[in-house]
Structures are given as structure tokens and as C-alpha cells.
Amino acid sequence: MKETIGVLALQGGFREHGAHLRQCGIEPVYVKDPDDLAPCRGLIIPGGESSCLRRLMKGFALDSAIIDAVHSRQMRVWGTCAGAILCADEIIGETPCLSLIEASVERNLFGAQLASFTEDTAIPGVCDTPERFVFIRAPGIRRVWGKTRVLHVTRDIITAAENDDVLITSFHPELSSSLSFHRYFASKCGVSIQNSPDQTWAPTSWMTLG
Ligand code: GLN
């Protein structure tokens, strides 16, 4: 069985993550069922709606399967936006879901849908030159503790953090032309990548970036 990276494909932006992985030379597995996790060295939990994803994960018994894979064989996890909410040990005002990283997140901390924004920024260790990151009704990371390291801060709010197994980002690298975070996550998973150039993002779904 060839090891690869999975993308949780129950709801939200899973196709865009899959397209970015393919650009890195990785054929993703779209995870809809616990058995789909078997070849996955890592799993991306996409943005979408965390309350909906939470319900669907539970319905398909994927929440316990993901937790088990992280603890039993160190499957790596990257949560983007709603995915980050689901990974956190603490969700302000709600019960935690997967509890995979020592971080406290607050939903919609950057405001409502109309307050969505982009930020051009470099993140040392991930991308050395500025790239565009997209925040859509984004959560913020209020604090981290224990083994969690802060990777990035936007408007005085932590927006990217990680421990050895888990990466969380408030924003959506899959909605820009940047492959940096997908390459970074692949190296965290120990999955080899092709050094394909970043491409101009040609959205086929719902969003156009200027
Ligand atoms: N606001 C959404 C939530 O709380 C997340 C939005 C997103 O993933 N872009 O689930």
C-alpha cells in the first residue's frame, strides 16, 4: 500500500486541497470512511463549517478513527480554518472535538463572512517570500501551551501553530497559488514531493482572487 496524504472529504474545501497535493506530485486519498485512513501518513481536515463537519465525522465514526490513528501510529493532521477548530484542545463556548493540539480557538474571531480578507505574508520556515493567505470567517487561536509552537500571528491573533504531529491554520492556503503549506505538511508527514512550481490559481469552484 503506497503511503500518501488524505483529505477529509465530508464537507468543505476538500477538492482544493486535493488539487494542491496533486500539484506537489501527491495523489491524495479522499477520506469518507475510517478504512480510507489506512494508507494515510497525514490527513488534511479542510475548511467548511465546523459544526457540520463535527456531526458528519461522528456519524461516520471518523472522529474516533482519526484520534486513534494519531495516537497509535502518529498520523499527522493539518486542520485549516474549520479543521483547525476541530483539532483544538479547547473551543471557546463549545466542547472540543478531536483534542489533538494544545491550543484554544475561538470561532469567527475575525468577524462575519463580509469581514473576510487576504494577507500577503512570509512565514519563516514555511515560505520565505510573501504569499497570499485567505481568511474566511476565520477562527483565531487565543492561546497555545505545552508543546505547541506559534508559527504566525495576524492582527495580534495567532493564526498558525503546530506541535510535532498537528498543524493548524486559521487561513486557507489551498485557496491561493501557494504550495508552501502543502509542501511543509508533506515534509511533516515524511511523504516525498515533486518540486513543481507554484501555479497561478485558476479557481474552478466558488472564489476568484485578484
Ligand atoms: N466559521 C466557520 C466555523 O466556525 C469556519 C469557516 C471556514 O472554515 N472558512 O466553522
Image (tube, rainbow, N blue to C red):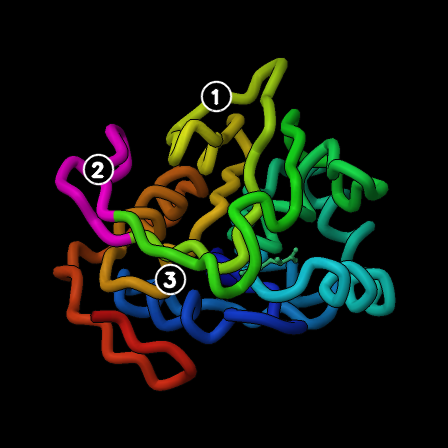
Numbered disc in front, either 2 or 3: 2
Please name the predominant secondary structure of the magenta segment in the image: strand
Q: Where, by quadrant of the figure, is residue 123 drawn?
A: top left
Q: Which of marks 2 and 1 is in front?
A: 2
Asked whether disc 2 touches disc 3, contact meaning CB atoms under 8 Å apart, the reply is no
Give the residue number, with chain letter if any, for mark 1. Answer: 149
**Disc 1 secondary structure class:** strand
Residue 178 vs residue 75, the one in the foreground: 178
Spot occupied by residue 50 in the image (x, y as percentages of width and height): 69, 58
Residue that extends furthest to the bottom in the rendered view of this protein: 204
Specify the amino acid type for callout 1.
Arg
Query: What residue is at 58 percent from the left and 56 percent from the top?
Result: 45
157 in magenta: no
Residue corresponding to mark 2: 122
At 27% from the left edge and 61% from the top edge, which residue is drawn?
24
Task: Note whether 140 is above or below 50 in the view shown.
Answer: above
- Boundaries of the magenta span: 120-132
Q: Which residue is drawn at 37% across and 56% down?
A: 117
> Mark 3 is on which residue type?
Glu
Between the residue at mark 2 and the residue at mark 1, the CA separation in whole angstroms equals 17 Å
Q: Where is residue 78 in the image (x, y as percent from the top left)?
A: 52, 47
Give the distance between the C-alpha atoms of the residues marked 2 and 3, in whole angstroms.
16 Å
Q: Tell me: 23 left or right of 112.
A: left
Picture quarter with the C terminus: bottom left
Q: In which quarter of the image is ligand 1?
A: bottom right
Residue 121 as seen in the image, left or right of residue 49: left
